[in-house]
């Protein structure tokens, strides 16, 4: 059906050996200063604005459930390990996650007091490796 496709693919492989996949490999510093959407397995979606200062992460978070909730973010990042606490008006939630080689951030969250109240989460946006 496509008799010329195989020679074309072989030709591209020979001519373009410097083209590499878009996946990050071994990023030592991820760019985190941005706005992200944290999508949780319990249906909650948070808008989270983060700022990175070295290994320290700060920022603010918002979500809407019958009213607008506002929280403060503080935590850290060590290579691919992401750990923050979001302090809401009456409680605190811990977000632990990892960044995979493609820049996807995901993990689990739980209430600081009620650790059985857990949810999985991921970011809609991909992170990019900061230029070193």
Image (cartoon, helix red, strand yellow):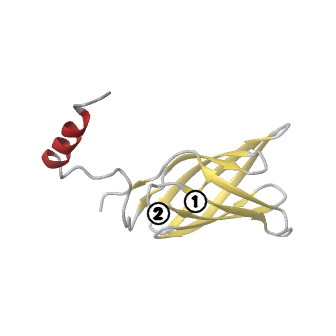
6 vs 86, left or right, is left
Mark 2: which secondary structure? strand
* Picture coordinates of residue 128, whole percent (x, y): 41, 53
**Few, some or many residues within 10 Å of mark 2 (<14, 14–19, 20+):** few
- Image position of 25 (left or right of 51): left
Q: Position of residue 89 (x, y in %)?
A: 81, 55
Q: Is residue 5 above or below residue 56?
A: above
Which label was assigned to residue 58? 1
Crowd around label 1: few <14 · some 14–19 · many ≥20 (10 Å) = some
Mark 2–mark 1 CB contact (< 8 Å): yes
Residue 108 lies in what quarter of the image?
A: bottom right
Query: What is the quadrant of the N terminus in the image?
Result: top left
Q: Is residue 105 left or right of residue 2?
A: right
Residue occupying the point 84% across, 70% down: 113
Q: Which mark is residue 53?
A: 2
Report x, y in % for residue 63: 73, 43
* Residue 114: assigned label: none
Residue placed furthest toward the bottom: 78
Above or below for 6 versus 99: above
- Quarter occupied by residue 26: bottom left
Query: Which quadrant holds the C terminus?
Result: bottom left
Of mark 2 and mark 1, the one earlier in the sequence is 2
Extreme-top residue of the structure: 1
Q: How far apart are the two marked residues, 2 and 1, measured between alpha carbons?
A: 8 Å
Residue 68 appears in which quarter of the rendering? top right
Task: Name the residue located 23 percent from the left edge and 41 percent from the top edge.
Answer: 9
Question: At 18% across and 52% down in the image, what residue appears?
Answer: 17
Residue 60 point in image, percent of width and height: 64, 51
Along the line of sight, the residue nearer the viewer: 127 or 56: 127
């Amino acid at each position: 059906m496509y008799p010329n496709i195989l020679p074309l693919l072989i030709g591209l492989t020979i001519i373009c050996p410097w083209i590499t996949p878009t996946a990050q490999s071994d990023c030592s510093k991820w760019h985190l200063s941005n706005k992200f959407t944290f999508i949780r397995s319990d249906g909650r979606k948070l808008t989270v604005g983060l700022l990175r200062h070295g290994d320290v992460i700060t920022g603010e978070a918002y979500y809407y459930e019958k009213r607008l909730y506002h929280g403060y973010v503080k935590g850290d990042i060590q290579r691919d390990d992401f750990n923050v606490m979001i302090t809401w008006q009456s409680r605190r939630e811990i977000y632990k996650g990892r960044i995979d080689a493609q820049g996807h951030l995901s993990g689990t969250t739980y209430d600081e007091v009620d650790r059985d109240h857990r949810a999985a989460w991921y970011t809609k946006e991909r992170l990019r490796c900061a230029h070193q």
